[in-house]
Image: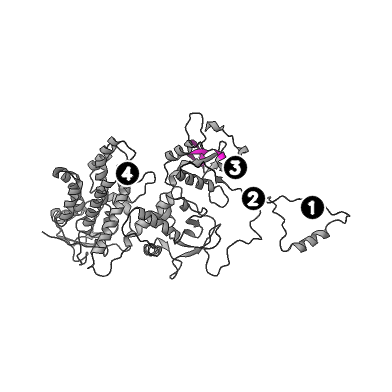
Amino acid sequence: MVIFSSASTFSSANPGFAALSIDQVLAANADILARIKLCYGADRESFETDVLALIRRYAAYVHLLPATADNYFSAPGGLLRLGLEAGFFSLQGTDAHIFSGRSTISTRRLLEPRWRHATFIAGLCCEMHRVLSHIIVTDVQGEVWSGYLQPLVDWLAERGVARYFLSWRPQAIETRCLGVFALAHVVPPGVLQYLSEDNTIIVPHLMASIGGMPIYRDHNILDDLVRRSLALVIDRNLLANADRYGSPQFGSHLERYLVDALRRLTSSNSAWVPNQEKSRVWFGQDGLFLLWPNAAEDVHKLLDADQLPGIPKAAETMLEVLLAAGVIEPQDAEHPTWTIHPPGAKSVLEAVKLTSATILFAGIDPPPEALDLKFVRHLGEPDPTPSPAAPRSARPGEQLSLIPPVATPPVMEVASERLPLTSEPPTPKASPPATPSVLFTLQAPMRLNPVVRDALAAVVHTLNEGAGPAQGCTMAQGFFVPLSEFERRGLQPSMALRALADVGMLVLTSSGGPPTFTRDFNGTPTVGIVVDPRFIAGFDLDGFALQDSGDH
């Protein structure tokens, strides 16, 4: 029997790996297999059918491959051990969570075994994407194994080789969505059919977790458990392997959690709506910026609530991790942060610049548009605060107030020379005052759901000058808001509809009719709701066909 220690220190790429049988490979992990069996809580026959069969297929696919070249789980068999430990802790975590919480008790009882099974699969296969994105496996003749076509054990048997070798792809990028293509070699169609019976949510949540895709409509509890378990086992492995050569790259695996937190905040937190007043996010012609360390504090609060081990608390540590991962772009070698001046800010602010806007806006459709402004202010540039003498430019056809500027006396002298000589001074023509900008604000009842209030207020704010593209529009009956704007902010449209209807803010198509309207918005037929304009300050109500207060 061959036993591989998880703390082995020899190179994982040389002199290669023996083509051991599946039983020999699993024998090195008997301890964790026993814990999984105990946690699954089934008889031996059910365990072997439901769980052990999947583990054997997973072992056949990854065999003795390490998870990383010189970081966590880098010993032979590291990827197998990583999957088993993540699957165990994910399965264990299901005991403290309720899936399908809105369903009836009988439905939850029916689906709970399927949720537990899917959660274990997601944990087992959570890092399988590395086989396709990071590793090259060859035999002694140099023939390359394709992980898309068959498991590694089947390829070794076909080639009839006794040893195989691996190399690491240079500058490989973590591409978690590739795990979906490898999943078919581990999870047979019959298992997916079992998981999908009597529901339409378990398999999508499983695939989203393995592929690293966020789900904005529902809370993916399965993925939360897997993410927490993976962070735990990686942190434990890094701390336990003190005999490795060199120092471990602590924190290098945290990039995914930090980026995921940034995206979650963008889709659900009203303070992360781009280019809004007091926003953390500013998107202009010179890039996408996050106010720092304000954004770091929000990220820490979110991840701390997720109870992820090893998450850095200091903004400086987060900055180092994101810099090393290439997520943010430094200003220069000595200054990782930038100085920006967003519209409306009283002074310059410190911020970090993301290398690409798609890092933050992935999954948001349509993505936010950049303002036609540049925010960056370099050292030595003049104070960007606008001069009080010229607060704004005149609009076409608009006459600005004639409050005398500094050069008024000469102008008045020239003007007096042109006046006719009369005994009475001419009556000055009154100039119309400058038209002030209309400020649109939401004035919702106090009993409106605060989350719905914040989302709707953010949409209304986009009507103001300089607040970016409008995310809603007016129509004869009131203010039209696409349902997608609630989804983009992490709200279920049904919840928003119910909350707005409860306080009488909706305009209905007809008595007893549906609460939604369909109209063209930005050239596309869009389903949305219409808010009674009386709840929005700044509208001229004479321009609307108002319903009686009892009709909405």
Amino acid of disc 4 = Pro
Residue designated by label 2:
436
User: Left or right: where does residue 446 sit relative to residue 388?
Assistant: left
Position of the N terminus, as image quadrant, is bottom left
Residue designated by label 1:
428
Amino acid of disc 3 = Phe
Kindly report the distance in space between the C-alpha atoms of the residues bearing marks 4 and 2.
51 Å
Residue designated by label 4:
204
Numbered tag placed on residue 539 in the rendering: 3
Kindly report the distance in space between the C-alpha atoms of the residues bearing marks 4 and 1.
74 Å
Question: For the residue carrying disc 3, how many other residues have a C-alpha within 10 Å: few (<14), some (14-19), or many (20+)?
Answer: some
Residue drawn at (32%, 39%), measured in percent from left and top?
Answer: 200
User: Left or right: where does residue 472 sit relative to residue 11?
Assistant: right
Q: Secondary structure at mark 4?
A: helix
Q: Is residue 188 above or below residue 313?
A: above
Asked whether the residues under the numbered discs 2 and 1 touch, taking CB atoms below 8 Å apart as contact, a structural biologist would say: no
Queried whether the magenta region covers residue 407, the answer comes back as no
Give, as a single range, the part of the protein colored magenta: 508-534
